[in-house]
Amino acid sequence: MKIVDKISVEELKTMAERMYGSLVKADVDVAKKVVIVDMEMHADGEAELLEQGSRQEDLWGINLYPDKFGTPEFIEFDSMINLKPRQNNRNRGVDDPQIRQQIAAIVQEVVHE
């Protein structure tokens, strides 16, 4: 597990092969614009970011599919840490389109070919 400023698609592919085969779990702090990748469970990344001073309400879990880089299927908004009833997010996805857009923009800044 590591916090990344920049990461290549090739690095993500290597992580995916080691862990799940086709995906890399990642968490994004939308306030700090921080991404942590390569953990077994989103909750692990969440715990690390909380230790680093992130706020729970700013953290969202996603899956990255390196083989689908450059397509809408590259980012999957699906994680147990996304269940946030107090923020009106009552499922594993990310209901708010603005938050999804923020996450996508941050990932776009971090992941490169």
Image: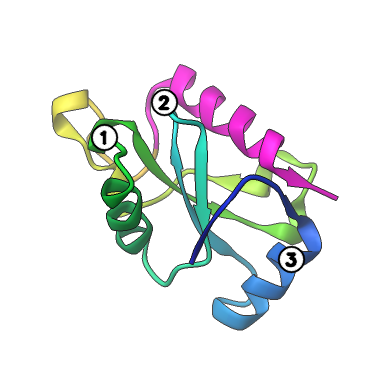
Residue picked out by circle 1: 55
Left or right: 74 in relation to 58:
right
The image quarter in which residue 84 lies: top left
SS assignment for the magenta stretch, majority: helix
Tell me where the magenta segment starts and ends, as one range. 94-113
- In the image, residue 100 lies in the stretch drawn in magenta: yes
Q: How is the image coloured?
A: rainbow
Residue appearing at x 76%, y 42% in the figure: 71
Task: Determine the secondary structure under disc 1.
Answer: loop
| Callouts 3 and 2 close, C-beta under 8 Å | no
- Residue identifier under label 3: 11
Q: Nearer the viewer, residue 52 or 87?
A: 52
Which residue is drawn at the image coordinates 55% and 78% (left, top)? 19
- For the residue marked with disc 3, what is the amino acid? Glu
Q: Which residue is mark 2?
A: 31
Cα distance in 3D space between marks 3 and 1: 28 Å
Give above or below for 29 relative to 16: above
In the image: residue 21, left or right of residue 100:
right
Secondary element type, mark 3: helix
| Sequence-first disc among 1 and 2 | 2
Q: Residues within 10 Å of mark 2 (few under 14, many from 20)?
A: few
Marks 3/2: CA–CA distance: 25 Å
Residue 36 placement (x, y as % from top left): 49, 53
Q: Earlier in the sequence, mark 3 or mark 1?
A: 3
Type of amino acid at the residue the image marks with label 2: Ala
Q: Position of residue 91 (x, y in %)?
A: 28, 41
Q: Amino acid at mark 1?
A: Arg
Residue farthest along the right direction in this orientation = 113
Please state which of residues 4 and 101 is positioned toward the viewer in this rendering. Answer: 4
Q: For the view shown, which residue lies furthest in the bottom direction?
A: 18
Q: Could you say whether the residue bearing mark 2 is in a helix, strand or loop?
A: loop
- Residue 101 lies, in percent from the top left, at 55, 23
